[in-house]
Image (cartoon, rainbow, N blue to C red):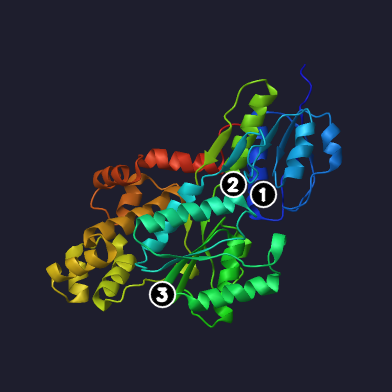
Amino acid sequence: MQPTPRVALFVETSRAYGRGVLKGIWQHVQAHDRWSILFRPRGLEEPTPAWMASWQGDGIIAHVTSLRTAAVLKRSAAPCVDVLGDIPNTGFPVVKTDCLRIAELAFGHLAGLGLKNIGICGMRRGHRPRLDERCDAFQSLAEDAGYDVNIFQPRGGGQYGPSWAKEQKQLVDWVRSLPKPIGIFACNDIRGRETLDACATADIPVPERVAVIGVGNDELLCELSDQRLTSVDVNPIRVGYQAADLLSRMMQGQNVPAKFNVSPRRVVERQSTDMLAVEDPEVADAVKYIRLHACDAIDVNDVVQEVAVGRRVLERRFRDLLGRSLKSEIVRVRLARARELLIETSLSATTISYRCGFSSPAYFMDHFHKKVGVTTKEFRESARREEDPDPDED
């Protein structure tokens, strides 16, 4: 009988991301392996204990947060998988969130609000390279789309940056100075919360003048405010599950990829982006009507009658401001609702098609496949694997 592998988990537990990673690891263990796990709750910046250098275990999964941590873990003979990706060239395989896909989801959401101004709220450059990568990806997307991007990074304070109080004052001054209305991409949910606090201090209404989207979908951070924070769900359970899979293969002597990117799941919309920055009142009325009634089987004529503007004029103004037609907006809203129902319910695709206002199941499924790139069945199965990667195994 093979001895039970001894695996150490050095993953922070102070935030939802780390706890999601741990859940994914445990799901893999339950489905595939029997590990003896060494673990205790940790903070993100907590150093790895020096005794790990001589630990006689079989495998390690860790948030590698510093060169010191990397050096300690390297001295151990056990294979290690990094689930953070902040320290380059450690020699450890890295499982991390896909920064480009995160940026694409966040930018698509803010651009879809009709905003003409875009900002980025980042951390001190070099402090958290993974967050820098997110911001850089978002900036590239926005600039490629023709936006001038307003960027916040803390100033001063030497190696460790300014104090919290000074940094918050800088952030308040920055949000006051921005052209408005504006959409701000915050590099994580903590930064998103701080941006909302800065807007409150500056007496700037959210989301009417400033819309904010974070990253991480930490429910406590996102809900703990009068203005609840919209955020990108980065799929930490899948990160943990994939890390456990790589470590299991490494402990069996197999080769594994040096990097594995996990795609985010979706944007979880909350109050901080519940706005529409369109100055044309008829176009704004059309968008509001579509968002309220798209799933009621409306068509373009219904929208035109509601707004009381000629169809050709409304179509032209709508396309000029939002870059898509009235019909495309109706379908976009219906498909967004269909995605939610596919993830959150067990309703059949036929039932969902009618609930979302499509004329027939065949039309819905054909359109879904064209726009999303997978069938409704594949989309649902993928979402369920991300929540429970091995739902039929225990």
Q: Is label 3 in contact with label 2 (beta carbons under 8 Å)?
A: no
Mark 2 and mark 1 in contact (Cβ < 8 Å)?
A: yes
Q: Within the image, what quadrant is residue 279 found in?
A: bottom left
Give the labeled residue for mark 2: 236
For label 1, the residue is 18
Determine the CA span between mark 1 and mark 2.
Answer: 7 Å
Name the residue rendered at 56%, 70% in the picture.
Answer: 195
Q: Amino acid at mark 2?
A: Pro
Instruction: Give above or below for 257 relative to 353.
Output: above
Please tell me whether mark 3 sits on a helix, a strand or a loop.
loop
Quarter of the picture containing the N terminus is top right
Q: CA distance from mark 1 to mark 3?
A: 34 Å
Is tag 1's residue or tag 2's residue first in the polypeptide sequence? 1
Q: Which residue is mark 3?
A: 181
Residue located 69% across and 67% down the image: 157
Question: x%, y% of residue 26?
Answer: 67, 39
Q: Residues within 10 Å of mark 2 (few under 14, many from 20)?
A: many
Q: Earlier along the polypeptide chain: callout 3 or callout 2?
A: 3
Q: Quadrant of residue 315?
A: bottom left
User: Helix, strand or loop at disc 2?
Assistant: helix
Q: Residue 118: horizontal and vertical position, in percent?
A: 43, 66
